[in-house]
Structure formats: structure tokens, C-alpha cells
Image: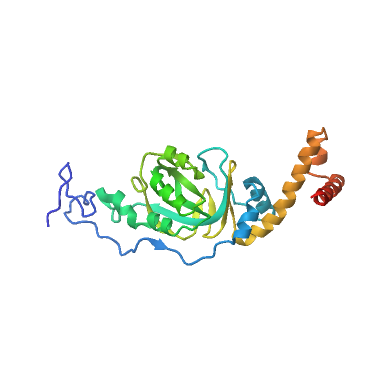
């Protein structure tokens, strides 16, 4: 069988790419069923999400460190606009490197609708935060305006991408909180990556994120909170946020930094009395 030729006269494989030199046969596609979907998982309950919603990413990261979890900060992604904040259940999407025997050729952008990128959006539930593994790629626009708009309409709370997005101005206009490493005009599979799997563990910014983990993201960046540790983080963070508020009051009144940040045994007692008085006054 004679394959169509490329502009330089080489035969073209059935996937739209040049066939290997010296052959006129298409690349043999591996026996892989895509998209890959992970197993069922449990999302955190709404009460846990609401309680964690009072915790900043900095405090969540610090408390996880104190509990023995050293890597929770997703390094790289920054908010598309200042002031964004989100707390929600992680809905995961994994990109993988493209390979010529799996690539979709000239119709690739349309083939995307059958990939994990489309499927994960259909799986979205209200309050989900889409967490995307993209290896910090500078050339893959993992999400654009239409997909972000659809995700938001399904109740999606935010997106964290270890890579780039496209249509950044339109996504900003949506008001959907997004954290990414930057922007690009490329569509998702235009360059070196391809949407591969969803509802699977992903690596983002050097951090492991499991489906159903909690994501806390604000101006300081995203933090991944394991679902099983969320309530412990909430309890510890509440005390931390309260004594920091007390310390700010005292410092604004002219107190010494070393007495109130962090609290000493004496000023801790003063804080407890202040907190008790505040509770009684409510």
C-alpha cells in the first residue's frame, strides 16, 4: 500500500506523521485503551471543606510540616489574578509525553474530545478543584476558555495546573480561580504532551496529589492536604490563626516582637485569657 507523501517526499504514516525512514508502513499502534481512569474514591465531606476554608495555604503548609508532612506546597503555579482563593476536593488529570505511534496527527485537536481531558470535565462535581499534572510544560495549553467555562458551569471551584493555560484573558474574565505556571497560545496536545488519565494520583510541582485530597490555594500558592489529615490541620490551624490575630493586636499597640511572635509561656496565658473574654462577649 502506498501512503500519502509529506512535502519532502517521504511516506506518511496512518497517524499523519512521517513514516520511519526507509519504510512505507505505518507505525504499529500499541494495544492501549484511552483514556485511563483510576478507581473510585471518596470526596471529603462539605463540613471539612468549609472548616478548611478558613485556613490560609501558608498556615496549612506549616501545620502539615509540624505533623510530619514535608512536601505539600505545589511549587510553580501562580494565581492568574491576585486575590484568588479556593478550597476543594482534588479532581485529577494526568498528561503524558506524546509518542509517534499514539499521536493523532493533523486532526489531533478534535481527537482530544475522546481523551481524559474531556472525560475529567464530565466527571466534575460542585466544589472540585481540577489538579493537572503537566510537568511544568511551557508549550501545552492544558485548559482554554471553553473547557474552563464548562468546568465552572458544572460547579468546579478552581484549577491548579503544573503547566500552562491558553485563552488567559477570557478565563480571567470568568472569575474562575486558576493557578498555572504561565500562558501559551498552544492547545493541550499541540506540543509534547497528551491527556492520558484521570482520577489517578498525579505529581504537581514536586508534590503527590491523590484524588479526593484537599487543595488550599491563595496568593501564596497551592497546598495539598491529605484528606485523612484535614481535620487535624483544621484544629491546629484554628488555634494558630487566633493567636496570630491576638499578636497583631499587641504588636500594633507597640509590644515587642519577641514577646508575641511566637507567643511565650507568659503571653500564651495572656492570649488564653483574651480568647476566653472574646468568647464570653459573643
Q: How is the image coloured?
A: rainbow
Q: Is residue 144 visible?
A: no
Instruction: Tally the numbered discs.
Output: 0
* Depth check, front residue: 82 or 63: 82
| Direction from residue 220 to residue 159 in the image, left or right | left
Q: Which residue sits at x=45%, y=64%?
A: 38
Q: Quadrant of residue 46?
A: bottom right
The residue closer to the viewer here, 173 or 84, is 173
Can the viewer see residue 232? Answer: yes
| Residue 13 drawn at (x, y percent) | 21, 53
Q: What percent of the width, then of the height, locates residue 88?
A: 56, 54
Image quarter in which the N terminus is found: bottom left
Hey, which residue is sitting farthest left in the picture?
2
Viewer-proximal residue among 262 and 250: 250
Q: Is residue 243 left or right of residue 166?
A: right
Residue drawn at (22%, 49%), measured in percent from left and top? 18
Q: Nearer the viewer, residue 128 or 216?
A: 128
Q: Examine the rendered structure and indicate whether residue 15 appears above or below residue 262.
A: below
With 49 as the anchor, is 196 left or right in this view?
A: left
Residue depicted at 43% across the width and 37% down the height: 169
212 is higher (above) or lower (below) than 223: below
Residue placed farthest to the front in the image? 282
View extreme (bottom): residue: 40
The x, y position of residue 74, in whole percent, is 55, 48
- Compared with 37, 240 (above or below) is above
* Residue at position x 18%, y 51% in the image: 22
Amino acid at each position: 500500500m502506498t501512503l500519502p507523501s509529506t512535502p519532502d517526499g517521504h511516506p506518511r504514516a496512518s497517524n499523519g506523521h512521517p513514516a520511519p525512514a526507509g519504510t512505507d508502513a505505518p507505525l504499529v499502534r500499541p494495544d492501549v485503551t484511552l483514556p485511563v481512569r483510576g478507581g473510585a474514591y471518596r470526596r471529603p465531606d462539605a463540613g471539612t471543606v468549609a472548616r478548611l476554608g478558613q485556613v490560609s495555604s501558608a498556615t496549612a503548609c506549616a501545620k502539615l510540616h509540624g505533623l510530619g508532612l514535608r512536601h505539600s506546597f505545589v511549587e510553580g503555579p501562580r494565581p492568574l489574578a491576585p486575590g484568588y482563593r479556593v478550597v476543594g476536593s482534588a479532581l485529577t488529570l494526568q498528561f503524558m509525553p506524546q509518542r509517534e505511534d499514539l499521536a493523532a496527527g493533523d486532526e489531533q485537536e478534535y481527537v482530544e474530545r475522546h481523551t481524559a481531558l474531556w472525560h475529567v470535565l464530565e466527571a466534575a462535581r460542585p466544589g472540585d478543584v481540577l489538579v493537572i499534572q503537566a510537568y511544568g510544560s511551557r508549550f501545552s495549553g492544558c485548559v482554554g476558555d471553553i473547557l474552563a467555562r464548562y468546568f465552572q458551569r458544572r460547579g468546579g471551584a478552581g484549577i491548579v495546573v503544573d503547566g500552562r493555560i491558553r485563552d488567559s484573558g477570557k478565563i480571567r474574565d470568568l472569575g474562575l480561580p486558576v493557578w498555572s505556571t504561565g500562558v501559551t497560545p498552544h492547545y493541550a496536545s499541540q506540543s509534547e504532551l497528551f491527556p492520558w488519565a484521570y482520577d489517578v494520583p498525579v505529581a504537581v510541582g514536586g508534590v503527590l496529589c491523590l484524588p479526593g485530597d484537599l487543595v488550599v490555594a491563595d496568593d501564596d500558592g497551592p497546598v495539598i492536604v491529605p484528606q485523612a489529615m484535614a481535620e487535624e490541620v483544621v484544629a491546629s490551624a484554628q488555634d494558630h490563626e487566633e493567636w496570630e490575630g491576638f499578636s497583631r493586636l499587641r504588636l500594633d499597640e507597640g509590644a515587642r516582637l519577641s514577646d508575641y511572635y511566637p507567643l511565650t509561656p507568659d503571653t500564651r496565658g495572656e492570649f488564653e485569657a483574651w480568647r476566653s473574654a472574646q468568647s464570653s462577649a459573643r
